[in-house]
């Protein structure tokens, strides 16, 4: 049989893997550097450089923040998005000073 490019349609999406944990805890004011993610595709290979990370972390405000990682391959197949939750907490104990 004769095969054409039409017989080789890429329908498999890439797979995203987080670098590090899916949950990270920080203290207020602590430095934050996103460990990122990696992505591979069965046809395109390593597509890590095409990952789009969205979301921000405010290290000066307590709360839960979500970073979402997404990528598509050259054929337009979108990977299932992967998320990381970053919790910024105020763990500094208050100081009580007696007056008098």
Image (spheres, rainbow, N blue to C red):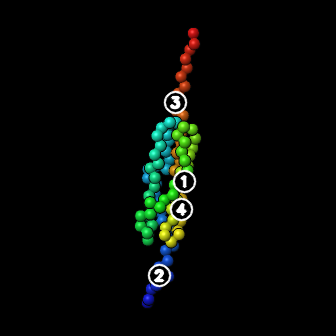
Residue pictured at 54% horizontal, 45% vertical? 57
Q: Quadrant of residue 45?
A: bottom left
x and y, in percent, of residue 25 in the image: 50, 41
Residue 92 bears which disc, if any?
Answer: 3
Closer to the chain start, of discs 2 and 1, is: 2
Give the SS element for disc 1: strand
Task: Give yes or no for contact between labels 3 and 4 (Cβ–Cβ under 8 Å).
Answer: no
Q: Kindly identify which residue carries mark 1.
A: 54
Closer to the chain start, of discs 4 and 1, is: 1
Could you tell me how far apart the alpha carbons at marks 3 and 4 are, in whole angstroms? 38 Å
Could you tell me how far apart the alpha carbons at marks 2 and 3 are, in whole angstroms? 62 Å
| Disc number lying in front (3 or 1) | 1
Could you tell me how far apart the alpha carbons at marks 4 and 1 are, in whole angstroms? 14 Å
Q: Kindly identify which residue carries mark 4.
A: 80
Q: Quadrant of residue 58?
A: top right
Closer to the chain start, of discs 2 and 3, is: 2
Could you tell me how far apart the alpha carbons at marks 2 and 1 are, in whole angstroms? 35 Å
Q: Kindly identify which residue carries mark 2.
A: 5
In which quadrant of the rendered image does the C terminus lie? top right
Task: Classify 10 Å Cα crowding around label 1: few (below 14), some (14-19), many (20 and above).
Answer: few
| Disc number lying in front (4 or 1) | 1
Closer to the chain start, of discs 2 and 4, is: 2
Q: Is residue 99 above or below residue 92?
A: above
Residue pictured at 47% horizontal, 79% vertical? 8
């Amino acid at each position: 049989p004769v095969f054409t490019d039409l017989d080789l349609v890429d329908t498999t999406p890439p797979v995203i893997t987080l670098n590090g944990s899916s949950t990270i805890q920080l203290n207020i004011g602590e430095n934050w550097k996103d460990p990122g993610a990696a992505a591979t595709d069965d046809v395109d290979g390593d597509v890590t450089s095409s990952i789009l990370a969205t979301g921000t972390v405010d290290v000066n405000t307590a709360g839960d923040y979500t970073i979402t990682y997404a990528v598509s391959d050259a054929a337009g197949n979108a990977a299932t998005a992967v998320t990381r939750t970053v919790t910024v907490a105020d763990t500094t104990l208050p100081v009580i000073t007696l007056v008098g």
